[in-house]
Image: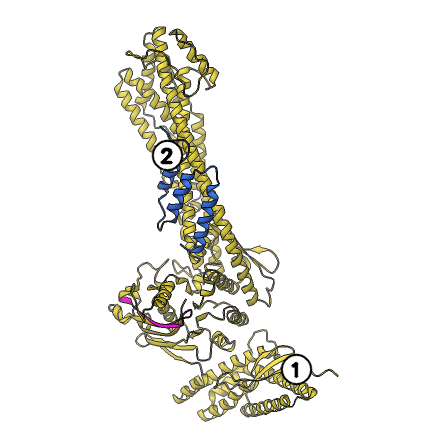
Amino acid sequence: MAGIESEVLETFLTQLADDDDVPTAITEKLGELLAAAKLPKPEQLAALYAEASGEALL
Amino acid sequence: MIQIQTLRIEEFRGIRELELDMDSSSFAVFGPNGSGKSGVVDAIDFALTGSVARLSGAGTRGLSVTRHAPHVHQRDNPAAAKVSLTFTHPASGQVGVLTRCVKTADQFTLEPNTPELAGAVAWAAQHPELTLTRREVIKYVNTEPGKRAQEVQALLKLDRIDETRRLLNTARNKTSSTAKSAADAVKSAEDGVKRVLDITSLLSSEVVNAVNKQRDVLGLGALPTVTLETDLSAGAKVGGNQGSFNKASAARDVKAVTDFLAEHADLDQAVSALTAALGELEADPTVLDALKHRQLVETGLPLVTDGVCPLCDLAWPTTDALRQHLADKLARSEAAAELQQRIQAAAGKVVGQLRSVRGLIQTAQPHAVTMGQSALQKSFQEWSNDIAAFEAKLGTVESIRQESERLTTDPLGTLSPIAAGIGALQTAIEALPDQTATESAHSFLSVAQDRWTQVRQTRATATKTTAAHKAATAVYEKYNAVADAALTTLYKSVEDDFSNYYRQINSDDESSFKAGLSPTAGKLDLEVDFYGLGMFPPMAYHSEGHQDGMGVCLYLALIRQIHKSDFRLAVLDDVVTSVDANHRRQFCKLLKDIFPDVQFIMTTHDEVWARQMQSSGLIARRSLARFHGWTVDGGPIYGQGGDFWVQIEADLAKDDVPGAAHKLRRNLEAALADIAASIQGQVVYRADNNYDLSSFFAAVKGRHGDLLKKATASANSWNNETAQQKAEILKAERAKAMLAQDGEKLGDQRTRTQQRLGDHDQSRLRAGGRGLQEVPGAVHVQQCQLSRMDLRARHPRKGRGAPLLMWDLDPKPT
């Protein structure tokens, strides 16, 4: 990953960690997914948001 | 980083065999159109990357390196086509030979294969932007913001940022769609509860009252309050044949469907807005056409470099007319894009209404089963499925257009048997004997509890999907903010460099030029100052030549930002064609001053430009390859070294006196024009810019004489014997050169000069040439400012001499 892209991702994740609207699990998983050589599918991210946001449904 | 020492090309593109000695320094390839210059650029591109930019990308369908990179005579023998680069790795000082063959384009040989050299080759392979044509350079200027962002980010290797941005936006849109669907489900569930409780709102007090009335019938304790967790039927013995069927509630469920079919103002309103928007689209075929061709126009506009359409080759009266035509198309497609958004928003409202009616159908459907009307139940199911399928088709403009007839006739798609069946079902339910109060209370609480549970569940789902959408939005917006901030900083730096470079090239008339690059959400706006009158898009008022200058300045600013000190090589194919001679002189100075360590390899069809590169010192005298012509069998006819006296001798050896005379005149004109500029010689202004040799001679002789007089006076006033002696030497050289030139007695008019030179026989031209040969060397002044000059003795055939003296022309104060 080019230097500037890497810097953007790092700053983004740092700031996201302080965002109350974004659960920690999302931030951590995004860190993995967005740093990978191949970006994930949008459906994968939508599923991550759905699973990790709000209270778990029984 | 890499710099090229020698380039050897075999059977590649238009070249049969060619070897150029570039000596790791800037180099120019000059020749007329079709002489094979671009083959040199393609060869370097191929050697470094394994591909040829000219054979890939937009508009190159059907072209490939394997089939079309070999010389046409070797098109079935790609093994014969190869390029070898002997290159320097400046950081380590190592020298290697990189060879690549078209047959195995993705492989190369490297000798010696040291880690440093292998690393340099790998680095170069990842940077195709080091080799650019004018068309590629100008695209950074003449393109719309979204496309420019893509091009620039690709150049800066920032495309991953854009990809990530799009990914996060798409994911956010998906969560939005899910959240909307969940909200519709909540509304359906709430409506179901309201129908069974026969209340108009879900106020806690209304729910408690309705439920407690029924609990009272069963002798159950009143609920003091309710929450979504409350069991409304707590304590009731739910069961029996009609435990989950409440006649009154069922009647209201079926009536809700009937009522919706009879009147659906909200759906009508949504459909009306959608069909109106669709009507706008259909009413103006050009808008629809613009929408379809938007991407094509976006791609085509930057490719317009002359008055010929890049797609169909249709000739237009002017380049500007063609550009304006395409810009108008793009403007129409902007309106179409806005209309597209309105259509999709209206379709979303229609979908919401359709989901509501599906909720009603699904609630009424079990009652058909209870009443033994299985055919109606099946129809309900089919109807619900049909509406769901219709909803799915309202996703894109094209599919919405295909559904326009249903939208205008019967968006609900209600079949008459269903309408009749619903009426029969309602009649049958109403005809049922009234349930006993106890039975009714039991079933009431049972159904109410089921629907209460649905409300709880759908609300929980909606809460979760809303949270997911909120998180997705926060993620997207945060990434945008961080990326935009980083790119703003980056682009600010690029903007400063770009403005600075452009000002240097155009210091005569745009010394206060400034540019503005602003990235926002995946777009990159570029505006430039136009003579202090405001900031405008580059294409708005600036000439093609100025746009060319902007393109190359922006490229240099970007590339410097990417590579910083690693920027050591750039191969530029005819990039400043439209820039005039004076600005190209400044361009040479820019490259020399700002990028002294960069090897620029440039092609041009303009001999004056090639001369300027030499006279400015950007390229050495021998760093010029002249392509005189090209044949399909032999490839380029070329020579390297650039000593035109040698070429004149060669012409004379072939008895080509007119050719020799032409070269003599053109080169002397170019050389004396450069000298006149460097010593500020005054040439009589000509409105047609058609200066001839004698004009330059007069200006150079006059100014040089004045400077020598001033230098002599200064040397005398300071009583500087060394300087006095040097001045005498220079005067003697000048006198000798002038004598030789005067002997030639050139005519005053260009036509006369050409005629005289052209009419010469060999001996006369040789004699005249020798006299003329002395002049540039005698008067050459390397550097001249108002108070100092560096006078160098230089012979045009021997290259630059050592400086004779640095002279302070100011006389000693008295």
Distance between the Cα atoms at labels 1 and 2?
90 Å
Question: Residue B347 appears at what percent x and percent y?
Answer: 41, 35
Q: Which chain is blue?
A: A
Above/below status of B36 relative to A46? below
Give the camera-side residue of B479 and B133: B479
Q: Main secondary structure of the magenta part?
A: strand
Q: Residues within 10 Å of mark 2 (few under 14, many from 20)?
A: few
Q: Which residues are magenta?
A: B89-103
- Mark found first going from the N terminus, 1 or 2: 2
Above/below status of B302 relative to B381? below
Give the camera-side residue of B395 and B494: B494
Chain of the residue under the numbered disc 1 shown in the image: B
| Label drawn at residue B405 | 2
| Label drawn at residue B20 | none
Residue B540's image quarter? Answer: bottom right
Question: Residue B534 appears at what percent x and percent y?
Answer: 60, 55
- Label 1 belongs to which residue? B809
Give the camera-side residue of B328 and B212: B212
Q: Quadrant of the C terminus of chain B?
A: bottom right
Q: Which chain is yellow?
A: B
Above/below status of B226 relative to B316? above
Question: Residue A36 appears at what percent x and percent y?
Answer: 36, 49
Q: Residue at x 41, y 53 (%)?
A: B159
